[in-house]
Amino acid sequence: MESHNRIELVAFLGNPGRDYTQNRHNAGRLLAEALPFAPSLQWQRKYKGLYTTIEGSMLPAPPPERPIPDKIHLLLPETYMNRSGDAVYAAAFFFKIPLERILVVHDELELPLGTAAFKFSGGMGGHNGLRSMKANFTSLDFWRLRLGIGRPAHDDVAGWVLSDFSADERSLLHRVLDSCSQALVQALVHGPESLLPEWNKKQLL
C-alpha cells in the first residue's frame, strides 16, 4: 500500500476566535463541527492548536486489506491562517507523520459555493494557509479537501474571505458540510484516492 493512501492527520484550517467563526475563510474549521462523531470529540490545547483523536473503532469497518490506524489525529490550528502550517508541522513532527499522510481541509476561492474537491499536491492558489504549509514542510505533497466559497464580484478578496457567510449561504453550506463530512470519513476508511475521479470537482448542490 502506497504511503499517501492512508490519512493519519487531518488539519482543519481557519482563524481562531469568535469574530471569525462564521467567516468564509473558516469553512475548514466549520467542517470539523459537522463530522458525524463531532459531539464525542474532546479537544485540548496542544501543538499550537486544538487537538484530538478519533479511534479507528469510531469509523465504519475498513476492508481487511486496508487497515486504518488505531488513532487518527485531528487538529484545528490556533495560529491564524497565515501561520497554520506551524501547528500542522508541530503535530506531524511529534507523531512522525509523513507529509503525504496529511489531509488539509480549507476554503477555496476558485470553486463556487456548493462545490468541493479532493486532490493530492498542487499549487497554493494564493491561499495563505497553503503558503504556510509550504514554508514549514518545503513541499505541497499532501492531500487537500477544498471547500468552494467562490470569488467576490469586487476586488476586495481579503474582505470577502473574512466576511461571514450570508443567511442564504449558510443554508446551502449545511448541505455541503454534510456531504463533505461523509466524504472525509470515506477518505479515512478507504483512502482519499477512493473518492477520485468523482471528487476531482464535485458539485454538491
Image: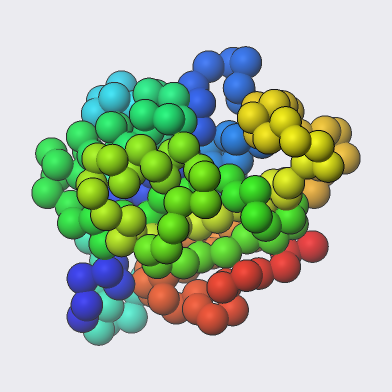
> Is residue 58 among what the camera can see?
no
Say which quadrant the C terminus sits in: bottom right
152 w.r.t. 98: above or below: above
> Is residue 29 among what the camera can see?
yes
The residue lying toward the viewer, choosing from 194 and 143, is: 143
- As drawn, the residue found furthest toward the right would be 168
Residue at 74% x, 55% y: name it.
112
The residue lying toward the viewer, choosing from 140 and 54, is: 140
Q: Locate residue 4, reporting x and y percent.
A: 27, 69
Q: Is residue 1 rendered to the left or right of residue 143?
A: left
The residue lying toward the viewer, choosing from 18 and 126, is: 126
6 w.r.t. 21: above or below: below
Q: Locate residue 52, reporting x and y percent.
A: 32, 36
Q: Locate residue 131, reporting x and y percent.
A: 39, 42
Residue at 23% x, 49% y: name it.
138
Q: How many marks?
A: 0
Q: Locate residue 188, reporting x and y percent.
A: 38, 63
198 w.r.t. 39: above or below: below
Q: How is the image coloured?
A: rainbow
Residue at 67% x, 57% y: name it.
111
73 w.r.t. 47: above or below: below
Say which quadrant the N terminus sits in: bottom left
Q: Quadrant of residue 12?
A: top left
Residue at 46% x, 67% y: name it.
119
Q: Quadrant of residue 75?
A: top left
